[in-house]
Image (cartoon, rainbow, N blue to C red):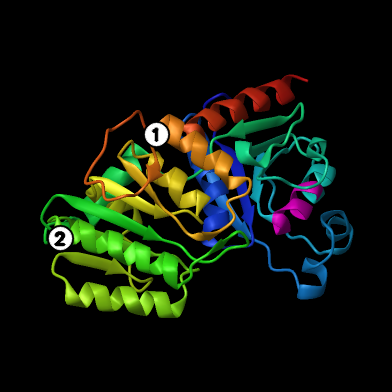
Amino acid sequence: MADEALHCLVISDGRRGIENQALGLAEACAARRPLTIQTHHISHKSAVAALPPKAQSRLAKFDLPRCDVAIGCGRQAIASLLFLKKAHPSVMTIYIQDPRIDPAQFDLVIAPEHDSIRGANVESTIGSPNRVNRDKIIVETLNFASGLSKLPMPRAALLIGGPSKTHKLDKVSHAAHVKAAQTLRDAGQSLLISMSRRTPDNIVLDWKRFASDHDHVWLHDGEGPNPYFAFLGGAEMILVTEDSTNMLTEACATGKPVFRLPMSGQAGKFQKLYTALESRCGAVVYSGQLGGEDYPPLTETARASEIVWERFDALRRS
């Protein structure tokens, strides 16, 4: 029985940055025990989506497959987890991030330290779970080897996000990011530049101009196969805009030198994350550095997966 695969349902609204947190945890769990993984996207009508999670769990229609473990991330996943637990009490429900309801509604909550959540069933991590691990980076780097081979080493990756509730990608911030890229290119670094779905169109256009004006620059603007993991594998150093906690922790999961690209706005609670990553991984603000010290990769997702199985076993024994 111990070798029989369990089934995990990954629930989100389908946004890449949200789904990848839950999927990353599921994949890390599958690396420890036989576990099949199925993704499920929530698509409530706007009127239902606007309701509080508990009201959604009573009024929305759910068509969820049976599973042993359900991992949800993002506000729209909460109602599904509540529904599953009520319909099938044996299902282990896990929520990632701050649910903003009583954490005791779930079997386990895994939240970033900077959210400052406490509870008997709450586990804190530096940043959020992600899909970055050694095997994935190796596979994806090999998949994009032909493109990387055209860019001489050393290489630097620039991961560009976009505006958020706390950060602004204004003209001043953008100009500083372009200056950082120019500094690296002038020093002989090849550049691997990745845009996020939140990067404004005018910023994307500027980076396209930059790439067309310089040799040895690979810009991925969302078209075609995504070389994101290959960029992490192919670069010797990684620069990340401060708005994206996901990209920062993903970059630090490589063990390579990581630098923050500042943005306008107020860091607020995210300053706690920056401090933790600076202490653990040396991820300081970029100021013209051409390298840095390696460190043991940040493996918070793997650590969280250990906790999942410990809690799962305890629930099955109770």
Q: Residue 186 carries which label?
A: 2
The kind of residue on which mark 1 rests is: Cys
Residue 144 left/right relative to 253: left
99 relative position to 73: left or right:
right
Q: 179 or 135: nearer the eye?
A: 179
Looking at the rendered image, the quarter that the N terminus falls into is: top right
Q: What stretch is highlighted in magenta?
A: 75-82
Residue at x 13% of width, y 69% of height: 215
Residue nearest the observer in this picture, 164 or 77? 164
User: Which quadrant is home to the C terminus?
Assistant: top right
Q: What residue lies at 36% left-to-right and 63% top-to-bottom?
A: 176
Q: Is 302 covered by the magenta stretch? A: no
Q: In this view, does 262 lie to the left or right of 112?
A: left
Q: Amino acid type of disc 2? A: Asp
- x and y percentages locating residue 100 in the rendered image: 78, 47
Above or below, 180 against 215 in this view is above
Provide residue 252's location: percent of width, then percent of height.
Answer: 39, 40
Up-down: is 32 above or below 170?
A: above
Residue at disc 1, secondary structure = helix
What label does residue 152 carry, if any? none
Local crowd size for mark 2, using a 10 Å CA cut-off: few (<14), some (14–19), many (≥20): few
On screen, residue 221 above or below 263: below
